Structures are given as C-alpha cells and as structure tokens.
Amino acid sequence: MNRETSAMLFARAKKLMPGGVSSPVRAFKSVGGDPVFIKKANGSYIWDEDDNRYIDYVGSWGPAILGHCHSEVLGAVVEVAQNGFSFGAPTRNESKLAEKIIEALPAMEMIRFVSSGTEACMSAIRLARGYTKRDYIVKFTGNYHGHGDMLLAKAGSGVATFGLPDSPGVPKGAVEHTLCCPYNDIKAIEELFRKYPEQIAAVILEPIVGNAGFIRPGAEFLPNLRELTTQSGALLIMDEVMTGFRAAWGGVQVNLNIKPDLTTLGKVIGGGMPLAAYGGRSDIMQLIAPSGPVYQAGTLSGNPLATACGLKTLELLQKSGNYQSLANLCKKLMNGFNGLAEKYRIPFISDWEGGMFGFFFCDSPIKRYEDTNNMNIEIFRRFHRGMLDKGFYFAPSAYEAGFVSLAHSMQDIQATIDAADEVFQELADSL
Ligand code: PLP
C-alpha cells in the first residue's frame, strides 16, 4: 500500500506541531510507523491522502455512530450554518438537544453544554466539590477523564500508551486531593472512605472502561459504589463521554438502572462536532453559574453547528433496533477474531457492549488496568500494522476500545475477519 503522501505530510506536520499531531495517540507512536493522513470519510470508510480506502473502526474515537457524513446530519448542519456559525447567545436547538438527552437519562435532570469531554469532567468535579464542600476525589487507575490537571493521575488512554503515570507540568498540589484506586475493587474504595471520612467529594469512573482496552465492571461493583457514595455523602460521577449513547441509548447507567448524581457526556452527543455536556440532579446543577456560585463558562459552548449535528444524530439513532444492530456487528467481529485466535493458538480475549468493543492479546481476564501488564503489546503492534496494510483502520494503541457504526455492514465485518485470518496466521508463524 502506497502511503507516500501521508509520509510527506507527516514530515511537514512534525516541523509545525509537536509530534506532528493535535492529540498524542494519533501519531502512531505505540504501534510504530507513520500515521495515515485522512482526506475524507463516508459511511464505514475513510480514505487517506494517497486514496487508499480503509474500513474504519475508530469512528473519530467514538462519535461517528451513524457512520461518517450521514446525508441527513450533513443536511441539518448545512441548514443551520447558513444562518451563522456561532452567536454566543442561547438558541432553540440547545433546549431541543437538552430535552432529548434528559429524556434518555433518568438521572439527568439538568444539563450544561461544553465543548469537550475534558471540560465536562473538570466542571463536574468542580461542581461536586462546590456542592459537598469537600476536596478529595477518587478516580480509578486506567480510567481517563480528559487532561484536566487533577484527573491526570494514573489515567488510561494516551497517558497509558506512553507510560506516563502523571504528566510534567501538573503541580503536586493539583493532584494532592486525587485518590487513585484499582477498578473493580470495592474493598480498596471502602478503605479510602474509612481513611478520609467526610472528605471525599466524589467518585468518578467510566462505567465500562474504554481507555484501558475494554474493561467491564463486575456485577456488584457499580451498585456497591452507588451505595457507598450515598452513605458517605460523596457524589457518584459516571463519565459516559465514551459509553453514552454508544454502549446503549442514554448510557450504561440506563442499562444497569443505576442513577449517578452527575454524568458527563461527549463524543456521540455531538455527532462528530465539538460538543460535550455534564448534568445530573437539579439541586446540584442549580449551583452552576448563573443560577448558583460555581463558575463555568465557554465562548463556543452549545455552538449551533454542534447542537444541530448532535440533535440530528440522536434523532436518527433513537430508532428501535439500532443498538441490537450495533451489538450484532460487534459480536460477529469479536467472535470472528476469537475463532481465529483459537485456530492459530494466539492468546486473545474480547468483549463488547452496544457499538463498542475491545480485545487484548492476553489469556487471563482483565478486570483492572493493572491486569493489562499481562497483554502482549508486541503482538498488538504487528496485528495493527498488518490490518492497516490490508485496509482496516483500528485504533493505534492497545489501550483503546474500538467502534462500529450503523453504516458498517456484515460484509464489512466478514471482510475484516478474512483479512485478520491472514494477519493472525502471520503472527502465529512468527511466534
Ligand atoms: N472521558 C472519557 C471516558 C473519554 O473517553 C474521553 C476521551 O476520550 C474524555 C473524557 C475526554 O474527552 P475529550 O477528548 O473530548 O476532551
């Protein structure tokens, strides 16, 4: 596969931008080789600058749940764009989108729009601290909640990829009140609550971890966490930036019938435009300025193009059967890979929920980030390059979940499994 133009563009970008990219994992550092520069996308496909076509399992890291460039979404965006791109004033569509989201998430009584998942999580933490008048927060190792200073402790995603437990530039004071715990370990959190009585403002978590591969909560983990936080007066914040409207309509909390105090959303609710949100109990949300004293603002928050894109995306997504279709695609893909791993005796485990999936080249269960030490990253790298060269675009990191869209067909999935058959065979031959 010729990728000369991508290579040339990457060389130029590296002189202009750190690592040649606007976000670290895009640089392909953890899989090796140069990143692919994307020219256009449609449905389940993306094309690079050398006109190579790939079946896309990244979907812009989650938002593209209908597939790329859906004609009705495009139409909605073009229509509002003709009336102006941004006003910095309230609009009708903000309330329409708010209603749609609130209708889907019983725990979300009020919502505030922001522009990124990072902002949503930072703001939810500030609000939780303002509400409880406590300082400590608890997060789980390998859970990623964006790059806000106080949350950049033992995060997953690009931070895990590069093996940076914390980042230089984050002052000690910023993480001094961040307590980290292994995922799926309720005893460890109980211990923290004993150690810091009435000092913990909130526990924040991904209800399915998608930033350390794919890690599912144990059956009792979330109910226990709900009970524990309620008893101790701490807020439970579910970060559904990735899982919201992706793993299920609304989010994982809807499927599991657990009501967090606050929820953060992003990715799918903006349909590919910069839009995210936080929301929850109205007595807590009323503390946000201008109703209350907790300050948070944004020039582009609730941007008209983004709200139009998100609203049309959710309207189309709401049709019944869509999440079953997404799950069927993931199931076929993961079962296909499982079969190949068995055939070629390669250690492999996989899982999925709705339209997100994950796999590890590993033969022991992964229940927390610490267990990912057992996976074989070298095999993942070779798998990634092998698939890329055959026209299949998977996330360039072993620590990221994968995504399908409603535009993916069963033929796309079968073609992926057929290509993976050759790649798995090459992997087996080299072991
Ligand atoms: N929270 C989760 C669970 C995420 O997966 C991400 C991004 O991947 C974020 C927060 C941060 O969102 P953003 O990249 O929009 O700032």
Image: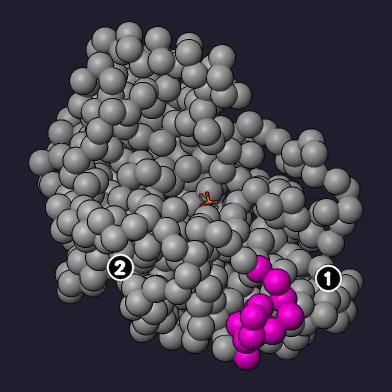
Determine which residue is flagged by label 2. 311
Residue interval drawn in magenta: 283-296
Which quadrant holds the C terminus?
A: top left
Residue at 55% across, 59% down: 299
Q: Residues within 10 Å of mark 1 (few under 14, many from 20)?
A: some
Q: Is-magenta flag for residue 295?
A: yes
Q: How is this picture coloured?
A: one colour
Residue at 49% across, 36% down: 398
Q: Quadrant of residue 278?
A: bottom right
Q: Residues within 10 Å of mark 2 (few under 14, many from 20)?
A: many
The residue tagged with tag 2: helix, strand or loop? helix
Q: Is residue 80 left or right of residue 16?
A: left
Amino acid type at mark 2: Leu
Residue 392 versus residue 66: which sits nearer the camera? 66
Main secondary structure along the magenta-highlighted residues: loop
Where does the image place residue 179, in percent across and percent down from the top left?
79, 60
Q: Is residue 90 left or right of residue 158?
A: left
Where does the image place residue 10, in percent across and percent down from the top left?
45, 16
Determine which residue is flagged by label 1. 135
Residue at 49% across, 19% down: 13
Q: Quadrant of residue 349?
A: top left
